[in-house]
Image (cartoon, helix red, strand yellow):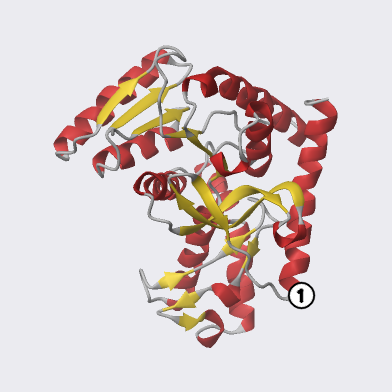
Amino acid sequence: MKNRVGIIGVGNVGATLAFNLASKNICNEIVLKDLRENIVEAMALDISQAANAAKSKTIVKFAHNAEEFCDCNVIVITAGIPRKQGMSRDDLLLTNAKIMTSVMNDITKYNPNAIYIIVSNPLDAMVYTALKAANLDKNKVLGMAGILDSARMSHFIQEKLGYAEGEIEASVMGGHGDDMVPLANYSTVSGKPLDKVLNNDEIEEIITKTRHGGAQIVKLLETGSAYYAPAYSTSLMVEAILNDNKKVYPCAVMLEGEYGYENIVAGVPVRLGKNGVEEVIELKLDEKQNAEFAKSIASVKELVNTLEEKFFA
Protein backbone atom coordinates (compact mmCIF):
# COMPACT_ATOMS: atom_id res chain seq x y z
CA MET A 1 0.00 0.00 0.00
CA LYS A 2 1.35 3.42 -0.98
CA ASN A 3 2.10 6.05 1.64
CA ARG A 4 0.88 9.44 0.48
CA VAL A 5 1.70 12.68 2.27
CA GLY A 6 -0.16 15.90 1.55
CA ILE A 7 1.26 19.34 2.30
CA ILE A 8 -0.98 22.41 2.32
CA GLY A 9 0.94 25.66 2.21
CA VAL A 10 4.15 25.54 0.21
CA GLY A 11 6.08 28.42 1.71
CA ASN A 12 9.53 27.95 3.22
CA VAL A 13 8.44 25.35 5.78
CA GLY A 14 6.17 23.37 3.45
CA ALA A 15 8.68 23.33 0.59
CA THR A 16 11.58 22.36 2.86
CA LEU A 17 9.49 19.59 4.41
CA ALA A 18 8.60 18.23 0.96
CA PHE A 19 12.28 18.31 0.00
CA ASN A 20 13.26 16.43 3.19
CA LEU A 21 10.60 13.76 2.70
CA ALA A 22 11.35 13.28 -0.98
CA SER A 23 15.15 13.22 -0.75
CA LYS A 24 15.04 10.76 2.17
CA ASN A 25 12.53 8.49 0.39
CA ILE A 26 10.23 8.54 3.42
CA CYS A 27 7.00 8.12 1.45
CA ASN A 28 5.84 6.97 -1.96
CA GLU A 29 4.03 10.14 -2.97
CA ILE A 30 3.88 13.78 -1.94
CA VAL A 31 1.06 16.02 -3.12
CA LEU A 32 1.37 19.78 -2.69
CA LYS A 33 -1.42 22.34 -2.50
CA ASP A 34 -1.23 26.12 -2.29
CA LEU A 35 -3.31 29.07 -3.47
CA ARG A 36 -0.39 30.14 -5.69
CA GLU A 37 -0.70 27.49 -8.38
CA ASN A 38 2.35 28.57 -10.38
CA ILE A 39 4.49 28.43 -7.24
CA VAL A 40 3.23 25.02 -6.17
CA GLU A 41 3.75 23.60 -9.67
CA ALA A 42 7.30 24.97 -9.72
CA MET A 43 8.02 23.48 -6.29
CA ALA A 44 6.66 20.09 -7.33
CA LEU A 45 8.94 20.09 -10.38
CA ASP A 46 12.00 21.30 -8.47
CA ILE A 47 11.60 18.87 -5.56
CA SER A 48 10.81 15.99 -7.91
CA GLN A 49 14.05 16.68 -9.76
CA ALA A 50 15.93 16.76 -6.45
CA ALA A 51 14.39 13.39 -5.57
CA ASN A 52 15.65 11.97 -8.86
CA ALA A 53 19.13 13.32 -8.13
CA ALA A 54 18.94 11.49 -4.79
CA LYS A 55 17.73 8.31 -6.53
CA SER A 56 14.63 8.47 -4.36
CA LYS A 57 11.48 6.65 -5.44
CA THR A 58 9.20 9.36 -4.07
CA ILE A 59 6.88 10.98 -6.63
CA VAL A 60 6.05 14.66 -6.09
CA LYS A 61 2.80 16.08 -7.48
CA PHE A 62 0.65 19.18 -7.09
CA ALA A 63 -3.11 19.42 -6.76
CA HIS A 64 -5.25 21.94 -8.62
CA ASN A 65 -8.26 21.33 -6.37
CA ALA A 66 -9.49 19.47 -3.30
CA GLU A 67 -10.59 16.43 -5.30
CA GLU A 68 -7.01 15.85 -6.46
CA PHE A 69 -5.73 16.29 -2.91
CA CYS A 70 -7.06 12.96 -1.70
CA ASP A 71 -6.35 9.61 -0.03
CA CYS A 72 -3.44 10.90 2.04
CA ASN A 73 -2.12 8.99 5.03
CA VAL A 74 -0.67 12.13 6.59
CA ILE A 75 -1.51 15.77 5.87
CA VAL A 76 0.69 18.63 7.04
CA ILE A 77 -0.87 22.09 7.19
CA THR A 78 1.42 25.12 7.21
CA ALA A 79 -1.15 27.51 5.71
CA GLY A 80 -1.68 30.85 7.41
CA ILE A 81 -0.35 34.38 7.45
CA PRO A 82 2.46 35.79 9.62
CA ARG A 83 1.73 38.62 12.00
CA LYS A 84 2.12 41.93 10.17
CA GLN A 85 2.88 45.40 11.45
CA GLY A 86 -0.17 46.93 13.09
CA MET A 87 -1.92 43.56 13.43
CA SER A 88 -3.09 42.59 16.89
CA ARG A 89 -2.69 39.11 18.33
CA ASP A 90 -6.45 38.60 18.01
CA ASP A 91 -6.37 39.70 14.36
CA LEU A 92 -3.73 37.07 13.61
CA LEU A 93 -5.58 34.42 15.61
CA LEU A 94 -8.94 34.99 13.95
CA THR A 95 -7.51 35.34 10.43
CA ASN A 96 -5.58 32.08 10.70
CA ALA A 97 -8.54 30.35 12.35
CA LYS A 98 -10.60 31.28 9.30
CA ILE A 99 -7.91 29.88 6.99
CA MET A 100 -7.58 26.69 9.07
CA THR A 101 -11.33 26.09 9.11
CA SER A 102 -11.56 26.62 5.36
CA VAL A 103 -8.71 24.18 4.75
CA MET A 104 -10.19 21.50 6.99
CA ASN A 105 -13.65 21.86 5.45
CA ASP A 106 -12.09 21.62 1.99
CA ILE A 107 -10.04 18.46 2.43
CA THR A 108 -11.33 16.17 5.18
CA LYS A 109 -14.02 14.49 3.08
CA TYR A 110 -11.43 13.44 0.51
CA ASN A 111 -8.99 12.15 3.15
CA PRO A 112 -11.06 10.06 5.57
CA ASN A 113 -8.13 8.17 7.06
CA ALA A 114 -5.55 10.95 7.29
CA ILE A 115 -3.57 12.03 10.33
CA TYR A 116 -3.24 15.83 10.42
CA ILE A 117 -0.07 17.61 11.56
CA ILE A 118 -0.58 21.33 12.16
CA VAL A 119 2.37 23.71 11.82
CA SER A 120 0.43 26.99 11.43
CA ASN A 121 0.62 29.60 14.19
CA PRO A 122 -0.48 30.31 16.84
CA LEU A 123 0.19 26.59 16.98
CA ASP A 124 -1.80 25.31 19.95
CA ALA A 125 -4.84 27.40 19.04
CA MET A 126 -4.70 26.18 15.43
CA VAL A 127 -4.69 22.54 16.58
CA TYR A 128 -7.77 23.35 18.66
CA THR A 129 -9.37 25.06 15.63
CA ALA A 130 -8.64 22.15 13.30
CA LEU A 131 -10.12 19.64 15.75
CA LYS A 132 -13.26 21.68 16.29
CA ALA A 133 -13.74 22.55 12.60
CA ALA A 134 -13.43 18.96 11.39
CA ASN A 135 -14.87 17.14 14.44
CA LEU A 136 -12.15 14.51 14.25
CA ASP A 137 -10.91 12.17 16.96
CA LYS A 138 -8.22 13.85 19.05
CA ASN A 139 -5.61 11.27 18.09
CA LYS A 140 -5.86 12.35 14.43
CA VAL A 141 -4.86 16.01 14.85
CA LEU A 142 -1.60 17.12 16.46
CA GLY A 143 0.78 20.03 16.28
CA MET A 144 4.49 20.27 15.61
CA ALA A 145 6.26 22.36 18.24
CA GLY A 146 7.86 20.27 20.97
CA ILE A 147 10.43 18.60 18.73
CA LEU A 148 11.48 22.01 17.43
CA ASP A 149 11.64 23.58 20.89
CA SER A 150 13.60 20.58 22.22
CA ALA A 151 16.04 20.85 19.31
CA ARG A 152 16.57 24.51 20.14
CA MET A 153 17.25 23.62 23.76
CA SER A 154 19.75 20.97 22.61
CA HIS A 155 21.51 23.58 20.48
CA PHE A 156 21.86 26.01 23.37
CA ILE A 157 23.16 23.23 25.65
CA GLN A 158 25.79 22.28 23.08
CA GLU A 159 26.64 25.94 22.54
CA LYS A 160 27.20 26.40 26.27
CA LEU A 161 29.25 23.20 26.67
CA GLY A 162 31.24 23.47 23.46
CA TYR A 163 30.99 19.71 22.93
CA ALA A 164 28.55 16.75 22.92
CA GLU A 165 27.24 17.26 19.39
CA GLY A 166 24.58 14.63 18.69
CA GLU A 167 24.67 13.36 22.29
CA ILE A 168 22.12 15.71 23.84
CA GLU A 169 18.53 14.79 24.65
CA ALA A 170 16.44 17.80 25.62
CA SER A 171 12.78 17.87 26.62
CA VAL A 172 10.26 20.73 26.37
CA MET A 173 6.55 20.75 27.24
CA GLY A 174 3.74 23.27 27.17
CA GLY A 175 2.45 25.72 24.60
CA HIS A 176 4.56 26.88 21.69
CA GLY A 177 5.49 30.33 22.92
CA ASP A 178 7.24 32.28 25.64
CA ASP A 179 5.51 30.17 28.30
CA MET A 180 6.86 26.82 27.11
CA VAL A 181 8.32 24.59 29.82
CA PRO A 182 11.88 23.30 29.18
CA LEU A 183 12.46 20.29 31.43
CA ALA A 184 16.05 20.30 32.63
CA ASN A 185 15.55 17.18 34.79
CA TYR A 186 14.41 15.20 31.73
CA SER A 187 17.35 16.42 29.63
CA THR A 188 20.69 14.62 29.35
CA VAL A 189 24.18 14.98 27.88
CA SER A 190 25.79 11.68 26.87
CA GLY A 191 23.32 9.99 29.23
CA LYS A 192 24.22 12.23 32.18
CA PRO A 193 21.57 14.47 33.80
CA LEU A 194 21.89 18.07 32.67
CA ASP A 195 22.51 19.33 36.22
CA LYS A 196 25.61 17.11 36.39
CA VAL A 197 27.32 19.01 33.56
CA LEU A 198 25.91 22.54 34.00
CA ASN A 199 25.14 24.67 37.05
CA ASN A 200 21.75 26.21 37.84
CA ASP A 201 22.59 29.64 36.40
CA GLU A 202 23.76 28.07 33.13
CA ILE A 203 20.61 25.94 32.93
CA GLU A 204 18.37 28.97 33.53
CA GLU A 205 20.21 30.85 30.78
CA ILE A 206 19.56 27.95 28.38
CA ILE A 207 15.88 27.83 29.35
CA THR A 208 15.51 31.56 28.62
CA LYS A 209 17.27 31.21 25.26
CA THR A 210 15.06 28.25 24.36
CA ARG A 211 11.88 30.21 25.04
CA HIS A 212 13.05 32.99 22.74
CA GLY A 213 14.80 30.81 20.14
CA GLY A 214 12.25 31.46 17.41
CA ALA A 215 12.15 35.21 18.06
CA GLN A 216 15.95 35.36 17.80
CA ILE A 217 15.80 33.97 14.26
CA VAL A 218 12.92 36.26 13.27
CA LYS A 219 14.91 39.28 14.47
CA LEU A 220 18.01 38.24 12.52
CA LEU A 221 16.09 37.46 9.33
CA GLU A 222 14.10 40.72 9.57
CA THR A 223 11.51 39.24 7.21
CA GLY A 224 10.27 35.70 7.74
CA SER A 225 10.93 33.05 10.36
CA ALA A 226 12.74 29.74 10.83
CA TYR A 227 12.04 26.91 8.41
CA TYR A 228 14.86 24.35 8.28
CA ALA A 229 14.42 23.18 11.88
CA PRO A 230 10.58 23.32 11.79
CA ALA A 231 10.50 21.35 8.54
CA TYR A 232 12.93 18.69 9.73
CA SER A 233 11.07 18.36 13.04
CA THR A 234 7.84 17.80 11.12
CA SER A 235 9.49 15.17 8.92
CA LEU A 236 10.32 13.14 12.05
CA MET A 237 6.64 13.10 13.00
CA VAL A 238 5.59 12.07 9.49
CA GLU A 239 8.16 9.28 9.47
CA ALA A 240 7.06 7.98 12.88
CA ILE A 241 3.42 7.81 11.75
CA LEU A 242 4.09 6.22 8.36
CA ASN A 243 6.52 3.65 9.77
CA ASP A 244 4.34 2.99 12.83
CA ASN A 245 7.50 2.96 14.92
CA LYS A 246 5.88 4.11 18.21
CA LYS A 247 8.50 6.78 18.86
CA VAL A 248 7.88 9.24 21.67
CA TYR A 249 8.01 12.92 20.71
CA PRO A 250 6.64 16.07 22.35
CA CYS A 251 3.65 17.22 20.28
CA ALA A 252 0.72 19.60 20.75
CA VAL A 253 -2.41 17.53 21.43
CA MET A 254 -5.84 17.89 22.97
CA LEU A 255 -5.77 16.97 26.64
CA GLU A 256 -8.73 15.12 28.10
CA GLY A 257 -7.77 14.63 31.72
CA GLU A 258 -4.04 14.14 31.22
CA TYR A 259 -1.95 16.30 33.57
CA GLY A 260 -5.27 17.37 35.13
CA TYR A 261 -6.51 19.45 32.17
CA GLU A 262 -9.56 19.12 29.93
CA ASN A 263 -10.43 20.46 26.49
CA ILE A 264 -7.18 22.36 25.96
CA VAL A 265 -4.25 21.82 23.61
CA ALA A 266 -0.69 21.69 24.94
CA GLY A 267 2.64 20.16 24.08
CA VAL A 268 3.27 16.88 25.91
CA PRO A 269 5.22 13.70 25.15
CA VAL A 270 3.18 11.32 22.99
CA ARG A 271 3.75 7.98 21.31
CA LEU A 272 3.28 8.23 17.54
CA GLY A 273 2.17 5.43 15.24
CA LYS A 274 -0.10 4.66 12.31
CA ASN A 275 -3.11 5.87 14.30
CA GLY A 276 -1.49 9.20 15.09
CA VAL A 277 -1.32 9.90 18.82
CA GLU A 278 -1.43 6.41 20.32
CA GLU A 279 -0.55 7.35 23.90
CA VAL A 280 -0.04 10.48 25.96
CA ILE A 281 2.95 10.08 28.29
CA GLU A 282 2.42 11.70 31.69
CA LEU A 283 5.73 12.81 33.19
CA LYS A 284 6.10 13.47 36.88
CA LEU A 285 6.59 17.23 37.23
CA ASP A 286 7.97 19.01 40.26
CA GLU A 287 6.18 21.93 41.93
CA LYS A 288 7.90 24.60 39.82
CA GLN A 289 7.27 22.73 36.57
CA ASN A 290 3.61 22.21 37.46
CA ALA A 291 3.28 25.96 38.03
CA GLU A 292 5.02 26.76 34.75
CA PHE A 293 2.84 24.25 32.88
CA ALA A 294 -0.27 25.81 34.43
CA LYS A 295 0.90 29.24 33.22
CA SER A 296 1.47 27.83 29.73
CA ILE A 297 -2.00 26.27 29.71
CA ALA A 298 -3.48 29.61 30.80
CA SER A 299 -1.83 31.36 27.84
CA VAL A 300 -3.36 28.88 25.41
CA LYS A 301 -6.69 29.14 27.21
CA GLU A 302 -6.76 32.90 26.54
CA LEU A 303 -6.51 32.21 22.80
CA VAL A 304 -9.13 29.47 22.96
CA ASN A 305 -11.51 31.75 24.84
CA THR A 306 -11.08 34.37 22.12
CA LEU A 307 -11.88 31.75 19.47
CA GLU A 308 -14.99 30.63 21.32
CA GLU A 309 -16.22 34.20 21.81
CA LYS A 310 -15.34 35.71 18.43
CA PHE A 311 -15.03 32.85 15.95
CA PHE A 312 -17.00 29.75 16.92
CA ALA A 313 -19.87 31.62 18.61
> In the rendering, at what x and y percent does residue 206 appear?
58, 69
283 relative to 67, above or below: below
Identify the residue at horizontal 78%, vertical 67% (top origin).
Answer: 291
Between 303 and 111, the residue placed more toward the observer is 111
> In the rendering, at what x and y percent does residue 270 appear?
54, 56
168 relative to 179, above or below: below
Q: Secondary structure at mark 1?
A: helix
Label 1: how many Cα within 10 Å (few below 14, some 14–19, many 20+) = few
291 relative to 94, above or below: below
According to the picture, the residue beneath numbered tag 1 turns out to be 287
Identify the residue at horizontal 38%, vertical 20% (top origin).
Answer: 40
> In the rendering, at what x and y percent does residue 273 appear?
44, 50
Q: Does residue 241 appear in this view? A: yes
Between 99 and 107, the residue placed more toward the observer is 107
Identify the residue at horizontal 57%, vertical 47% (top origin).
Answer: 219
Q: Does residue 83 appear in this view? A: no
Between 54 and 83, the residue placed more toward the observer is 54
> In the rendering, at what x and y percent does residue 199 appear?
59, 84
Q: Locate the N terminus by quadrant.
A: top left
Q: What's the amino acid at mark 1?
A: Glu
